[in-house]
Amino acid sequence: MQSENIIYMEQEQKLKLEEQIIMMLKTVFDPEIPVDVYSLGLVYKIDLQDDGNVLIDMTLTAPNCPMADFIFEDVRQKVESIDGIESCTVNLVYEPEWDVRMMSDEAKLELGFDLD
C-alpha cells in the first residue's frame, strides 16, 4: 500500500511541475506578437521525464522567423528556472504547420480575430 502512495505523490508532483511549465511558457513572447507562445498554439508537446528533464516540441508562426533563437533560448531558460527541472531541450518542428486556428480564443481576441 505504501508504494502506491509514493507513485501517487510522484504523479502529483509531476502534474504540478507540468502546470508550472505551462505558466512559464505563458511568459514567453515573440517580440513581434503581443501574445505568448503557449496561447498562440506554438507548443505542440511537453514531455516531462521522471528525471526532471523536459523535452518541448514547438514551432514558429513563420518558418524563417528571425527571432527563433531568442524565443527558444527564452523558453529553455525560463523552464530550467523551475525548481525540480534539471534541463530543457526545445525542438523545432514543422509538422503540423502552424496556422491561426491553433490559437486559444483569448489569443484570437487579443489579436482582433473574429471568433465566429
Image (cartoon, rainbow, N blue to C red):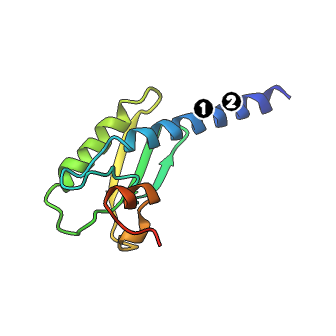
Res 10 quadrant in image: top right
Label 1 crowding class (10 Å Cα cut-off): few <14, some 14-19, many 20+?
A: few
Q: Position of residue 82 (x, y in %)?
A: 41, 30
Res 59 quadrant in image: bottom left
Question: Which residue in the structure is indicated by mark 2?
Answer: 9
79 sits to left or right of 64:
right
Q: Residue at x 52, y 43 (%)?
A: 49
Examine the rendered structure and indicate whether residue 114 appears above or below residue 24.
below
Examine the rendered structure and indicate whether residue 92 appears above or below residue 15.
below
Which of the image's four quarters has the N terminus? Answer: top right
> Secondary structure under badge 1?
helix
- Separation (CA) of disc 2 from disc 1: 6 Å
Res 39 quadrant in image: bottom left
> Secondary structure under badge 2?
helix
**Residue at the right extreme, as displayed:** 1
Label 2 crowding class (10 Å Cα cut-off): few <14, some 14-19, many 20+?
A: few
Q: Position of residue 2 (x, y in %)?
A: 81, 25
Q: Position of residue 40 (x, y in %)?
A: 37, 58
Along the viewing direction, whichever of 10 and 18 lies nearer the viewer: 18
Q: Residue at x 49, y 50 (%)?
A: 47
Identify which amino acid the numbered label 1 is placed on: Gln
Q: How many marks?
A: 2
Q: Position of residue 18 (x, y in %)?
A: 52, 41
- Residues at discs 2 and 1 in contact (Cβ within 8 Å): yes
Q: Residue at x 46, y 60 (%)?
A: 105
Q: Kindly identify which numbered label has been placed on residue 13.
A: 1
Along the viewing direction, whichever of 28 and 112 lies nearer the viewer: 112
Identify which amino acid the numbered label 2 is placed on: Met
55 sits to left or right of 67:
right
